[in-house]
Structures are given as structure tokens and as C-alpha cells.
Image (tube, helix red, strand yellow):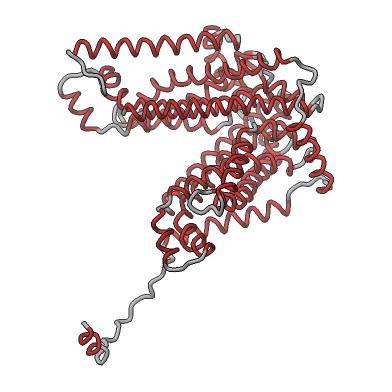
């Protein structure tokens, strides 16, 4: 704190004033967004409990919905492996881009800016836009979902990988260069082993994330478990849709637990 | 030194038979195993991917044409500038609203799920419920609520808020748990109540962490708001994006919308940098 206070009272008065201003600003933001969005706060909040009751009544899988289990599990598996493969493919290319684009290992500054800019572009195009653009060219196939996730992930991982490599100690690289290692030796023997576990933990995080996004991409492009959910949901077969929701939750939690374990083991 | 080393060469002690020292420690082996498994899944997936008889050359060519139409010749298409800007404002409003509501609820829930403030069983059970809510994708929450409340803004807000709360409770409670137990014990011993401890001792020390998590969630919510518009029909920019690309096949308009979204993303990036700089200087 730079300001000097004459008395504790003054300190607390100033703090209360600042808190009051922050709250007023937040309230104004809230009210403006309520008007823009046209949201009825009280009526909607009052409906939440009723919604939950409805959810538990209708979305509980019944005896009948067990018969849907086969196709659901198959699509869930397809969704999982598309999430994994798109992440891995993106991470391979992302790694090359990150090595070329990180401050410590980049061959030229110009390349660095180009890579930074394109990664940011890829990242900021919403997954909806990717899905719809690709759907037009690649039709309703798993490949559309794969590519949509691939482009998004490439943007994120390039940035994450670049930052990880830049966090690396410069002195290690200088030491390697001083004993006469060439560029490739520096990268493959100095940089990669050092960052491998951090990068893997990023990859695991993106796989989790992509599994969640895969549902959305599936709804938009008509593939995977997202399509199946939309299909049952629109036919009012809520018990089957509920089974899908439950299975997605279980799969996501399992994946989270596994990747936490792996992260702890490789740290 | 030289004499020493030369005399040593005569009676070099034989090394005891030790295990070969290897760089492959257990974490390294596990790392390799994980990467190998992921690689195998990827290869299997790429081989069995449903291509639906695609001709890749043609597909990529048409993608190139579309991308060119998008980025080089953006137009408003059949909508108007006023309409699109209003929809963009709706998306930003949706993100702000859900983040604020989410942060408010999440803070109070997080207080009751922090291990150093409440008994363990309560913290664990709240965290388990939140983990379950978090594991269901946002878009499904919105779709589920759109049945109960009807399509539109209300369902979108409630669905997005639901997921925001679950996400922020995790982040907030972890921040609260970083406050040392000693501080809390000392305050408790001197007779300070539960809420004063939270608002006078814990909250001031974790504000930077809370702020940065909340802002991250705001960015996520903005992306989600677009997705919700596309899939659940809240009247925001995502809906126009969906209509332009899925119904009118007007890639010029898609390009314009993407440019608008990029503009918002750049503004958000600058604001978040400023906010973080501001708070880092203060603390």
C-alpha cells in the first residue's frame, strides 16, 4: 500500500468506500446485462428447483433405456477416441510450432510472430464456427468433429507449449551451446526431456476438455454421442438422453481421476 | 595432484558390482507408457475414423474456398449491422450475467466446501456434487433447462450459471484452502465469528486469485454463450452464426461474425492483462 493513513478509522472508511464502489459497478454491470439479455432473474431462479425435480423424474434411466446401452456405449467410445486422437495430432504439430515459436528456441523472430498470431487466431475462432465451416466441406462424418477439435486444440496447445518452453532455464541451453551442441541436439537433448512431463499434463488436460467439447461438436455436426443425445432428446425419449448424460458424467470423472493419477506419477 | 593421480593408476580399486545407473526412472517409464498408449489409440482411431466416402482433395479445396470467402470478403449477408451488433452485445451480456451470478453463488458454496473452515464430510460431499455437475457439458445443462423453461434467454442463463458455479466452487475453495490453518485458528481463539473471519481475513488475501479465476471463467462463458446460441437458440450471435453457416451457407457473413468475435477476444485479452497487472502491483 502506498497511501499512509492517519488513523485506523480512516483506513476502514477508505476501504468501505472502495468496496462500495466495486459493488456498485458490479451491480450496474449486472443490471445492464439483465436488460440486454432480457433475463427475468426472480422467475428464473424460482424455476430452478422445479427444474431439478423435473430432471430427476424424467431423466432417470428406466428398464427400457437399458436396451439403448449398446449404441450409446459405442458412440461414447467413438467420441472418446476422436477426442484423444485430435488432441494427440494437434499436440504433435503444436510441439513443432512451439519449438519454432518459443523465444528460447526460435530460429528467427519473424517466425515467432507468425506462429503466435496464427495460434491466437485458431484459438479465438469459436468451436461452433469451426464445426459449421467444416461441416459444409467434410459432411456429416467423424472426420468433421476430429478436424474441429484439432484446430481448436492446436491453437491452445501451441500457446501452452510455447509458454512452457519459454519458462525453461536459459542457462541450461547456453551451457549446451557452449559445449558445442548444435540446434537439434539442444532441442532434443536439452529442451524436450525437461518439459516432457509438463507438456504431457497439458495434453491430458486438453483431452478432458475435448471430450466435453466433443459433445457440443457432435450436436452441431451430427456425429458421436452428441448426435445421439440430440436425437433422443428431440424425440422426447428423456430416459435414454438421461442415460447418455449419466454415462458422459461417469466417463469424464473417470478420465479426470486417471489423469490426476498420471500427473502425480510423472511429476 | 599430478603425482597423486599417477600413483593411483597402479592400484585402481575394482568397482563393486552395482546396478547399472539408468536415466529411465519410474516417472519416465510411466510417461513413456502413457504416451505410447495415447499414440496407439490415435492410430486406431485414425484408421477406423468414419470418413463417409469423403474425397479429401475436393473437401480441402472447398474448405480453402470457404475460408477465402470468410476472411477476405466478409459482408453482413441477409442480416444488418444493427442486428449483429445487438446479438454480439447479448452474447457479452450473457457471459457477464452468468459469470456474476456464478461467482456470487460459488463464493458462498465454496466457503462451505473449504476443508479448513467446515468439517470434512460436508466439504467432501459438496465437492462431489460439484464434480458431478461439472462433468456434464454446459450445453447439455442448457438443453435440459430449455425443456423446463422454454427456449430462450432464461434457460441459457440458468444452464450456463449452473456449470459456472460448479467450476468456480472448485477454484475458489482451493484458493480458500491455501489460507494457513494457523491464521484461522488464531482468529477463532480470539473469538472472531465465522463470517468476519471470511470477510476480514480470508477474502482480502485471496482476491487476486478469485479475480483471475473469475476472469478465466468469463472467457469460457463467452465461448459457451456462442455455443448455446447455436445449439439452443438463445437470440445471440451464436444463433446468427449457426443460421448463416448451417442454413444460408453464407460464408461471407460467417467471416464477419468471426471477425466480430475476434475483436471481442482481443478486448478481453487486453482487459485481463490490465486487471492482472493492476492487482499484481498492489500486492
Q: Is residue B139 above or below residue A140?
A: above
Asked if residue B164 lies left or right of residue B144, the reply is: left
Q: Is residue B157 above or below residue A111?
A: above
Quarter occupied by residue B281: top left
Counting from the top left corner in percent of width and height, residue B20 is at 39, 75
Q: Quadrant location of the C terminus of chain B?
A: top left
- Count of numbered marks: 0
Counting from the top left corner in percent of width and height, residue B167 is at 48, 29
Closer to the camera, B133 or A138? A138
Quarter occupied by residue B86: top right
Closer to the camera, B90 or A47? B90
Q: Is residue B279 above or below residue B82?
A: below
In percent of the image, x 46 and y 50: which residue is there? A198
Q: Is residue B279 above or below residue B146?
A: below
Q: Note whether residue B166 is visible.
A: no
Asked if residue A140 lies left or right of residue B206, the reply is: right
Closer to the camera, B129 or B78? B78
In percent of the image, x 59 and y 50: which residue is there? A97
In percent of the image, x 48 and y 52: which residue is there? A104
Quarter occupied by residue A43: top right
Counting from the top left corner in percent of width and height, residue B44 is at 68, 55
Which residue sits furthest left? B190
In percent of the image, x 62 and y 15: which residue is there? B148
Q: Quadrant location of the N terminus of chain B?
A: bottom left
Q: Note whether residue A74 is visible.
A: yes
Asked if residue B65 lies left or right of residue A40, the reply is: right
Closer to the camera, B41 or A231? B41
Asked if residue B41 lies left or right of residue B281, the reply is: right
Amino acid at each position: 500500500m502506498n497511501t499512509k493513513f492517519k488513523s485506523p478509522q480512516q483506513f476502514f472508511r477508505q476501504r468501505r468506500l472502495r468496496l462500495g464502489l466495486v459493488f456498485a459497478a458490479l451491480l450496474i454491470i449486472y443490471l445492464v446485462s439483465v436488460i440486454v439479455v432480457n433475463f427475468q432473474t426472480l422467475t428464473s431462479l424460482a424455476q430452478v428447483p422445479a427444474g431439478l425435480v423435473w430432471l430427476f423424474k424424467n431423466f432417470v434411466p428406466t428398464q427400457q433405456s437399458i436396451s439403448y446401452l449398446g449404441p450409446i456405449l459405442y458412440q461414447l467410445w467413438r467420441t472418446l477416441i476422436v477426442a484423444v486422437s485430435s488432441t494427440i495430432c494437434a499436440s504433435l504439430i503444436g510441439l513443432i510450432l512451439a519449438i519454432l515459436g518459443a523465444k528460447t528456441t526460435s530460429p528467427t523472430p519473424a517466425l515467432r510472430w507468425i506462429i503466435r498470431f496464427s495460434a491466437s487466431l485458431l484459438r479465438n475462432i469459436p468451436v461452433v464456427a469451426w464445426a459449421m465451416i467444416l461441416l459444409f466441406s467434410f459432411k456429416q462424418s467423424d472426420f468433421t468433429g476430429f478436424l474441429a477439435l484439432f484446430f481448436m486444440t492446436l491453437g491452445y496447445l501451441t500457446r501452452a507449449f510455447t509458454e512452457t518452453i519459454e519458462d525453461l532455464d536459459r542457462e541450461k541451453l547456453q551451457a549446451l551451446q557452449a559445449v558445442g551442441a548444435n540446434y537439434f541436439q539442444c532441442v532434443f537433448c536439452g529442451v524436450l526431456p525437461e518439459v516432457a512431463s509438463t507438456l504431457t499434463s497439458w495434453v491430458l488436460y486438453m483431452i478432458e476438455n475435448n471430450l466435453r467439447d466433443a459433445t457440443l461438436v457432435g450436436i452441431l455436426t451430427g456425429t458421436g454421442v452428441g448426435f445421439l443425445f440430440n436425437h433422443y432428446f428431440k424425440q422426447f425419449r428423456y430416459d435414454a438422453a438421461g442415460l447418455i448424460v449419466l454415462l458422459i458424467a461417469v466417463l469424464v470423472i473417470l478420465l479426470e481421476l486417471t489423469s490426476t493419477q498420471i500427473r502425480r506419477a510423472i511429476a | 595432484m599430478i603425482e597423486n593421480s599417477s600413483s593411483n593408476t597402479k592400484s585402481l580399486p575394482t568397482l563393486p558390482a552395482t546396478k547399472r545407473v539408468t536415466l529411465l526412472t519410474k516417472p519416465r517409464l510411466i510417461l513413456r507408457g502413457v504416451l505410447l498408449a495415447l499414440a496407439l489409440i490415435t492410430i486406431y482411431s485414425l484408421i477406423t475414423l468414419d470418413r463417409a466416402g469423403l474425397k479429401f482433395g475436393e473437401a480441402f479445396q472447398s474448405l480453402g474456398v470457404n475460408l477465402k470467402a470468410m476472411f477476405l470478403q466478409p459482408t453482413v449477408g441477409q442480416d444488418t449491422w444493427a442486428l449483429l451488433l445487438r446479438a454480439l452485445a447479448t452474447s457479452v451480456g450473457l457471459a457477464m450475467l452468468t459469470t456474476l451470478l456464478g461467482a456470487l453463488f460459488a463464493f458462498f458454496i465454496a466457503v462451505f466446501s473449504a476443508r479448513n473452515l467446515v468439517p470434512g464430510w460436508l466439504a467432501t460431499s459438496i465437492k462431489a456434487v460439484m464434480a458431478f455437475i461439472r462433468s456434464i457439458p454446459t450445453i447439455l445443462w442448457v438443453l435440459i433447462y430449455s425443456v423446463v423453461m422454454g427456449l430462450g434467454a432464461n434457460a441459457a442463463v440458468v444452464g450456463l450459471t449452473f456449470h459456472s458455479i460448479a467450476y468456480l466452487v472448485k477454484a475458489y475453495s482451493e484458493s480458500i484452502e491455501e489460507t494457513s490453518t494457523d491464521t484461522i485458528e488464531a482468529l477463532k481463539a480470539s473469538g472472531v465469528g465465522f463470517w468476519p473471519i471470511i470477510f476480514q481475513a480470508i477474502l482480502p488475501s485471496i482476491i487476486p486469485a478469485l479475480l483471475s479465476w473469475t476472469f478465466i471463467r468469463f472467457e469460457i462463458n463467452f465461448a459457451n454463450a456462442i455455443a448455446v446460441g447455436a445449439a439452443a437458440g438463445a437470440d445471440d450471435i451464436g444463433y446468427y452464426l449457426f443460421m448463416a453457416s448451417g442454413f444460408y451457407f453464407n460464408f461471407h457473413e460467417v467471416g464477419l461474425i468471426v471477425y466480430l468475435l475476434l475483436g471481442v477476444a482481443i478486448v478481453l485479452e487486453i482487459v485481463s492483462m490490465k486487471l492482472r497487472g493492476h492487482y499484481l502491483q498492489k500486492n
